[in-house]
Image: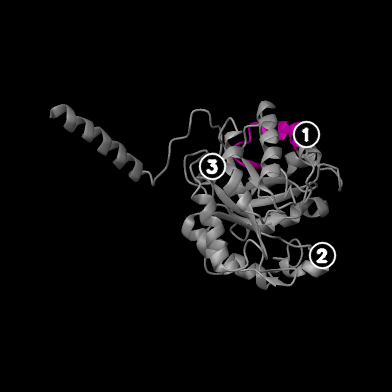
Amino acid sequence: MLIWMQGWKSILVAILAFVSVGGELPRPEAATGFYVNGTKLYDSTGKAFVMRGVNHPHTWYKNDLNTAIPAITQTGANTVRVVLSNGSQWTKDDLNAVNSIISLVSQHQMIAVLEVHDATGQDDVASLEAAVDYWIGIKEALIGKEDRVIVNIANEWYGNWNSSGWADGYKQAIPKLRNAGIKNTLIVDAAGWGQYPQSIVDEGAAVFASDQLKNTVFSIHMYEYAGKDAVTVKTNMDDVLNKGLSLIIGEFGGYHQGADVDEIAIMKYGQQKEVGWLAWSWYGNSPELNDLDLAAGPSGTLTGWGNTVVHGTDGIQQTSKKAGIYQ
């Protein structure tokens, strides 16, 4: 009986210790930065981290970086997703450029999610491989920054609404990144230009298993299909979480190509389920998509869309918490 009681006493002490530090989890020995545990993303200090931020279209407006990043941090964002190019479609963001981006974002106490945009909507494995090769080519900027840089392998690679082809590509891509020594948390966008979350439901576990570090997050882009109404938003989030996978909403808008998106439901249910989100995008969208501009220029005033994301109920100001390294 004494042994039994002592055993339970040890368990109780462990539980109380867990509660006393706010539900923090100890960092796995292999983790040097962000890491995934079940459906949650944790920062390098062991605190659960929920992304609240925006997308910044850097590669198309390279000269605006030093204006945009300070303006974005004023919103209270804890994360900024930065558009990069590997040179396939736009001017390449080289090692020096990426180092400068990471340094500036870190200076402003945000987490940098870096993504390659050139493979958007492509179905060929070669375009995904080009993104992988890009990351390997600039890995000096990533290694040692695992506590502040997350790698979104390829924006919206795989335009087709098909799960198996999408999974096959990533099951090749992820091991190649890991074998090159890149240990940063990885983000994989859903198939169907990011709007086919069934691909994650069908094959996400297999993609996750291909990561030897088990440090991959999945991303849905919620526009007129994946985020059209509250029921769809809830279903899409729940379906992925119920698979035991970690999820963010890597992009979303209020409208898209003339169709409504339920941004309020995305923000509200994201808060309820502790799912991170990154609104698209800071500024500079083409005229037919300018209702997606959060601000009027790199340091401009917030638009109606921007005010919703920053100041609205469940918006950045109410829900954003900085990563542990900045607290």
> Magenta span has 248?
no
Q: For the view shown, which residue lies furthest in the left direction?
A: 1
262 or 16: nearer the viewer: 262
Position above or below: 268 against 105: below
> Magenta span has 149?
yes
Along the horizontal axis of the image, is 271 left or right of 308? left
Amino acid type, label 2: Ser
Q: State the SS at label 3.
A: helix
Q: Quadrant of residue 178?
A: top right
Position above or below: 211 against 23: above
Q: Which residue is mark 3?
A: 325
> Which residue sits at x=56%, y=41%?
205
The quadrant the N terminus occupies is top left
Q: Which residue is mark 2?
A: 286
Tell me the tag on residue 133. Answer: 1
Query: CA gap, disc 3 to disc 1?
Result: 29 Å
The magenta region covers 132-151
> Which residue sits at x=71%, y=61%?
282
Q: State the SS at label 2.
A: loop
Query: CA gap, disc 3 to disc 2?
Result: 36 Å
Q: Of label 3 and label 2, which has the lower sequence position?
A: 2
Along the horizontal axis of the image, is 71 left or right of 321? right
